[in-house]
Amino acid sequence: MKIAIVGGGPGGLYFAALMKQLDPAHEITVWERNAPDDTFGFGVVFSDETLGGIENADPEFADAMARRFARWTDIDIHYRGRSHTVGGQGFAAMSRKDLLRLLQERCRRLGVSVRYSTLAPPVDDLSASYDLVVGADGLNSQVRAARADVFRPSLDRRHNRYMWLGTDRVFEAFQFFVRQTEWGTMQVHGYPYSESGSTFIVEMHEDVWRRAGFDDTEETEFPPGASDERAVERVRGLFAEELAGHRVFANNSKWLAFTTVRNERWHHGNLVLVGDAAHTAHFSIGSGTKLAMEDSLALAACLHEHQDIERALTAYEAERRPVVESTQRAAQASLEWFENIGMYVHQEPTQFCFNLLTRSRRITYDNLRTRDQEFADRVDAAFAKSQGLDEITPAMFQPFRLGELELKNRVIVSPMDMYSAVDGVPGDFHLVHLGSKAMGGAGLVMTEMVCVSPDARITPGCTGLWTEEQRDSWARIVSFVHDRSTARIGLQLGHSGRKGSTRLMWEGMDDPLPDDNWETVGPSPLPYGPGSAVPREVTRADMDRITADFVAAARRGAEAGFDLLELHCAHGYLLSSFLSPVSNHRTDEYGGSLQNRLRFPLEVFDAVRAVWPAERPMIVRISATDWVPDGNTEHDAVGIARAFVAHGADAIDVSSGQVTRDEAPAYGRSYQTPFADRIRHEVTAATGTAVIAVGAIASYDDVNSILLAGRADLCALGRTHLYDPHWTLHAAAEQEYRGAATQWPVQYGAGSRKPPTARTDAVRPRLSLLRADDPAGQNVHLRWTPPREPATVT
């Protein structure tokens, strides 16, 4: 093959070296606009997975890298004047300059032609003259720009400003310095990369950056390679304590705003993107160099395995995209955490450290316990103390008081529509469905959305509370839960609004009924999506009637014996559609500003609260974001939550989306938790109002991690309980917890132990667990100790 590579950074050079080793006959040319010694940046960090791949592909190069590594396992978090250490993590870092020199020498010996200080020819020319053109030209990729119509990139410029610096202070471990200043919170990410230097990244929110006066050079055009020396000098002064008398070094160092790069496609014809040209991930979870070299490994392997270019590039993208998108989700969570770090500086130090470490959701409580049991014990003890409890148990099994209602644990079975009622009457199915979940150990079981009138239903199979027959059937279910379990049961009340009069979910979710339709209503005559019915705009008389329906249903719910009531103001149903500017285009006092859009939902809340028994809690479910441009965002959610708290809500149940069919949610594990986190810290922390996290919370480890980090007070799980109705009991068994928070029904007591596996006499290969640098297998805290005196950094 004749291969053109645009960009002589680690990704491009590594790919060239791999391809040349796979077949010396490949003719490979690399264009690099900078000189070979024009190396920007300081240290790069690698994971064990990446190093394993490099070692497998090129043992000689891997060995050369290993001889230059700084290795350590500790993270030091400096917060409120104290240092907190967590071990067992595992890092390997080296100088970016050394890495490039190794790659340059490797390519030279293999016969790769590298044209330094040379701009690559136009992409059209390269594509016509070469079998393969690789865009490895970084964040500002010219290859990507030349084919933007095909790659369809999106560039998300973030809100923090950061500067990449180096220091001759050789840190012993990864360092997070969290500094409260008169302008706001600033942080430093620091780590060693050699016997003579460390990376020193200063980061802060743009608002803090401006208040501190760092924006005085914002309009300055620095020449290539030049640094913002005024800012560097200020950093030296601000972080003199952290530098401990050591120097700071600049290398093309200026204030940057991180840009997350995504592309709909990574290849077209004989063009392919790798590394930052294809994707970026925030530096707080790892190195872009690591991702670029992993791309190069996969691309070289796919080209070697497939003779056809198109098939090879398709295989490369299919292999790497899921990995990269997972990394980007974690990176997004991490960068947003650092953007909002000011929300957390009130936290007790141990909880703050745990929160920081689990920010990306890749590291969880169980991960940390495996790596550093002593730190995990401190987290457990600190959380129990914060709750006023003497007994240390898994966080999910600590009791919680919601208003005057005592819950035995912090697990909620989330509301899930079953579409299985007849004329709104819940039957035996609902008894078994909710009864089994209550016997499965959860602290609170929620009904599906119970509709307040026949025309408030989503589908003909929805349950209701507009008749005494429905009330009595619900009372039967409530009695079973109370008699046969120690769970509490909550009623969710709602009105479908413009999403009503549709088929059963399995017949066509959100599709209108073919006949026997009923009229739908909404704040404005706007359909939910293409093909949906156009709702009639509600009048003042309609609002009065609907409010009265809610009140009557709440009274029946109280008579049925429900322990709690949740008002459904989420997912695009009637009250939610009033809250969202996407569905509410009214020009009267019920539309326009957020204050106006809140007016009707608050009227309903107040009316229901007035008839709901005062000793029983009333909560609200909201959609924290609409996931569409011009819709509600997490910032609007803060205002919405604040309003309901002011009106007496005992908890805010934080979901998102389903307001319009045009939504584009950023799905992922626990993807809605950050919205609950924001509301808890910005709204409810001062009032004591509870926050419930929902959304793809998949494991007891997720639940414990969310609670211990202070992101929510309770966790609601839906699909997890469909998969396993006894999920909470099984979670207790997995964690070897036995206590009041999870009492097995006496009839099921024999099943309270986890069944044995098929093989119990296997011999564990213990010797394989030992490392050369850890003969006892217990070295949790490994610090970086340079092998010789530090050399002068130039």
Image (cartoon, grey):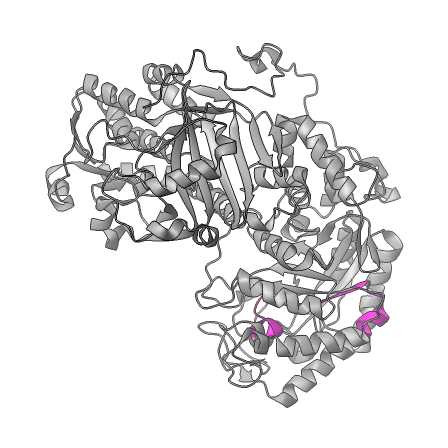
Q: Residue at x 45, y 65 (%)?
A: 662
State the image coordinates of residue 64 (x, y, percent, origin top left): 34, 15
316 in relation to 583, above or below: above
Residue 449 visible within the image: no
Q: Is residue 120 left or right of residue 490?
A: left
In this view, which residue lies farthest toward the bottom? 541
Q: Locate residue 701, reporting x and y percent.
A: 65, 39
Residue 484, compared with residue 13, is above or below; it is below
Residue situated in front as seen by the camera: 483 or 787: 787
Q: Position of residue 394 (x, y in %)?
A: 74, 38
User: On the rendered structure, is 228 left or right of 346?
Assistant: left
Q: Residue drawn 24% across and 30% down? A: 38
Q: Does 576 lie within the magenta span?
A: yes
Which quarter of the picture shows residue 401? bottom right
The picture quadrant where one finds residue 108 is top left
User: Looking at the rendering, in which quadrant would you find the N terminus?
Assistant: top left
Foreground of the two, 538 or 215: 215
* Residue 217, horizontal then vertical, whole percent: 33, 50
**Does the magenta portion include 129?**
no
Q: Is residue 613 visible?
A: yes
Which segment is the magenta one? 555-577
Which one is in front, 208 or 715?
Answer: 208
Name the quarter where the C terminus is drawn. Answer: top left
How many discs mark residues in the rendered view? 0
